[in-house]
Image: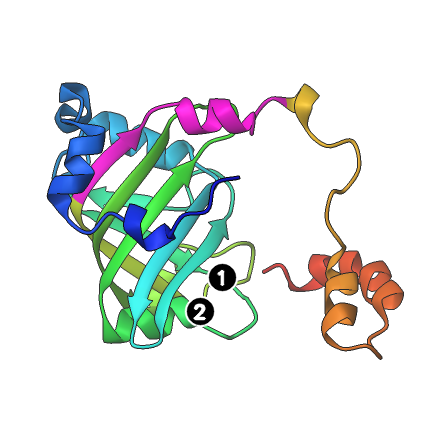
Amino acid sequence: MPVFHEDSFRINSLEELEAIYGDPSPKSLIKEIDYISDDYRAFIHASPFMILSSVGPEGLDSSPRGDPAGFCRVIDQKTVLIPDRRGNNRIDSLKNIVRDPRCSLLFLIPTVGEALRINGRADILVSPELLKNFAMGDKLPRSIIRVTVDRVYFQCTKALVRSKLWKFEDWPKERPTPTAGQIFKGLESEFDAERYDADYPKHMSETIY
């Protein structure tokens, strides 16, 4: 392998970057808008899984969010409401939002190749009546994240096709990573990984909401 200095191959300007990639596809510009269209609304309401990205003084955070499809509700062309369910109380995303409202959402739907992303600004609401509207049984979310939309854009299928994410026949037949208990044990040698993994399904059923 030839020896080279990596810094000499680093891109340092927009001009250098654009010289490599060229102009964006015209269609990629058409599909970016500053409001939630009817088709984008349908995509959001069909999604059971979303990733919330936020930024704060300590850095960046990306947090998975999931519930039955429709859990993220489009209120109007500029507003999405997201319930914040029970978790581990790190509340990294919420801490970020309080100090810096900028956020990004990425919506996925199983078997659908496209993804939908929203860039906007968020705040946190705790109105009792609003919380009741997002109840799961008798369990209320801790708060509601309100996102005001700046830009909406749908991503083409290339990434999900390349990853074969929705191609069931190519999914691993066995778990390809250590279990959660094994990961904990790697961080704390005295941790009882077997007990943790055995007990977790019951813990999940009791604490999911």
Q: Which residue is mark 2?
A: 142
Q: Is residue 69 magenta?
A: no
Q: Magenta stretch: give its range.
A: 151-167
Q: On residue 74, which mark appears? A: none
Q: How is the image coloured?
A: rainbow
Q: Is residue 27 visible?
A: yes
Residue 29: where, in percent of width, then height? 14, 28
**Residue at x 55% of width, y 61% of height:** 138
Q: Say what secondary structure mark 1 lies in.
A: loop
Q: Which residue is mark 1?
A: 85
**Residue at x 18% of width, y 22% of height:** 25
Q: Height in image: 32 above or below 207?
A: above
Q: Is residue 125 visible?
A: no
Q: Nearer the viewer, residue 13 or 114?
A: 13
Q: Using residue 133 as the reference point, say whether residue 203 is left or right of it.
A: right
Q: Identity of the amino acid at label 2?
A: Arg
The residue carrying pointer 2 sits among few (fewer than 14), some (14 to 19) or many (20 or more) residues within 10 Å by Cα, namely: some
The answer to the question of whether label 2 and label 1 lie on touching residues, with beta carbons closer than 8 A, is: yes
Nearer the N terminus, badge 2 or badge 1? 1
Q: Nearer the viewer, residue 36 or 127?
A: 36
